Amino acid sequence: MNKLLRQRAILELLKHGRVANQEDLQKTLRKRGLKVGQATLSRDIRDLGLSKTPQGYALSEGDGSSFPALPPVSRLVREFVLEVRVAQNLLVIKTSVGSAQPVAAALDDESWPEAVGTVAGDDTILIVCPDNKDARKLAARIQEMLA
């Protein structure tokens, strides 16, 4: 996984809970399928401007907690999507382990009218569409990116 996606995962972890130290961060990332060494993790912490507090790592003051920009959706789909299946008005998208959330975020950023909502797990994305026709149309759009 590239630096940008790894750093985005770190910021998301901090947004949703405490991370006491580098070892905890490394273990949590590993559970998401991201294997990262201590030196790389130290660089990411420095690059993201994280600060160490008594409660653990935190975003620096004045950071605004904005995520780094994602690569283009077509690139993420090509690199991480394994399968796209239509189930009536739903799309089920299988990704490589640990990749569903950044791919879902990129898909959401497209603001396609065919997508009502998106839910991402570790390796699966569920997209709810208004109807079966929109689901097929969106599936075709994503399949084109895989070609």
Image: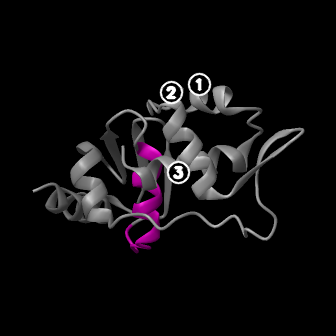
Specify whether residue 98 is in view: yes
Q: Quarter of the image for the C terminus: give it.
A: bottom left
At 49% from the left edge and 40% from the top edge, which residue is drawn?
40
Q: CA distance from mark 2 to mark 3?
A: 13 Å
| Residue 118 vertical position relative to residue 24 in the rendered view, above or below | below
Q: Position of residue 30 (x, y in %)?
A: 50, 27
At mark 1, the secondary structure is helix
Q: Which residues are magenta?
A: 100-114
Q: Position of residue 144 (x, y in %)?
A: 14, 62
Q: Is residue 72 left or right of residue 25?
A: left
| Residue 30, disc | 2
**Which amino acid is tagged 3?**
Gln
Does the segment drawn in magenta span residue 84?
no
Q: Is residue 120 left or right of residue 142?
A: right
Among numbered discs 2 and 3, the one appearing first in the sequence: 3
Which secondary structure dominates the residues rendered in magenta? helix
> Which residue corresponds to mark 3?
7
Among numbered discs 1 and 3, the one appearing first in the sequence: 3
At 27% from the left edge and 46% from the top edge, which residue is drawn?
81
Label 1 with label 3: CB-CB less than 8 Å: no
> Which residue corresponds to mark 1?
27
